[in-house]
Image (tube, grey):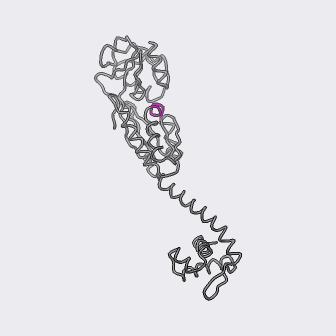
Amino acid sequence: MLNPVHLRTVVEVVAAGSFAAAARNLGYTASAVSQQVSAFERAVGVELFERGAHSIRPAAAALFIAERGGELLAAFDGFEQEVQALVTGRRGRIRLGTFPTASARVVPHAVARLTHDRPDAEIRLDEAEPDDVLPLVLAGDLDVALVYAYDLVPRTWPDELTVLPLLDEALLVLLPDGHPAARHQTVRPDDLRDARWIASRDGTAGSTCLTRLCAANGFTPRITFRSNDYGVVHALVRAGVGVALVPALGYEPQDGTQARPLRGTVLRRHVSAVHRTANTNPLLRDALDAVVAACALVEGEHLTRA
């Protein structure tokens, strides 16, 4: 196998015209250059230079090797720089999983910062609920994912994951304008025991949280509509067909609706970033820093950093 160090020496000898000049350019001794050229000649099976008492003359093979070798060395240098950029995070790929409300409120800020800091990096997004993205993180198909857990629906994370708390979201009661409960600054769940409710899909953490909240107050919610799209939930509430319990990231002030915190109980949804502890992607730290910075930008009355 040809040694690229020896190849570089041969190319430099042809360009410099002597072993001594090549040695000065490479920072070697003339003896080291001579030894490397001899080793390369043994590897290719042909003498590359006619050696005189005070000069050398490159053979045709040396000229050919110098021309093609220079191209190879330039390509190798470029490859080496690309690898260095990859391992230092200047280039590479980061794969981010997220859930819909974080996609709308947090992720755009994070992607903007990461794009600014690492313009040559490739950023991929995958949107799904926590139960769907966690297997992808564990399998290595995602580098980091934004996930959530409700106070009344606690969950544990696999031991292989590192969990970084990001945001605490208050749960808000979304009411149509003119609803009697909207006259107060806070709402008791018991005041809505006869209301029609709009909830997320059956079996989701949001739906389970609503059911448990109402059960703790002595009633079962009458759920008449379900949607995982908070835009649809807002539209249904605004149309006056029901009320809803929404996390702060899912709430956007709009005409026709009012949002009120719960009275007498503080319920929150907790947003975290999770990644495999063993993940060595050099862009991971930059991605986490970008997400943390993005969370600072969305802080507000009902959204606080964890």
Q: Is residue 121 shown above or below 76?
A: above
- The boundaries of the magenta stretch are 99-104
Taking the view exactly as shown, the residue that stands out farthest to the bottom is 53
Q: Along the line of sight, which residue is nearer the eye, 121 or 201?
A: 121
**For the point 67% across and 71% down, which residue is it?**
65
Most extreme residue toward the left, as rendered? 264
Q: From the viewer's perspective, is residue 149 above or below residue 223?
A: below
Identify the residue shown where x is 55% and y is 78%. Answer: 21
- Residue 261 lies, in percent from the top left, at 33, 23
Is residue 295 part of the magenta span, yes or no? no
Q: Residue at x 49, y 34 (%)?
A: 129
Relative to 300, 204 lies left or right: right
Q: Position of residue 262 (x, y in %)?
A: 32, 22
In which quadrant will I find the C terminus? top left
Residue at image position (51%, 35%) is: 128
Q: Is residue 4 above or below residue 107?
A: below
Q: Quadrant of residue 271?
A: top left
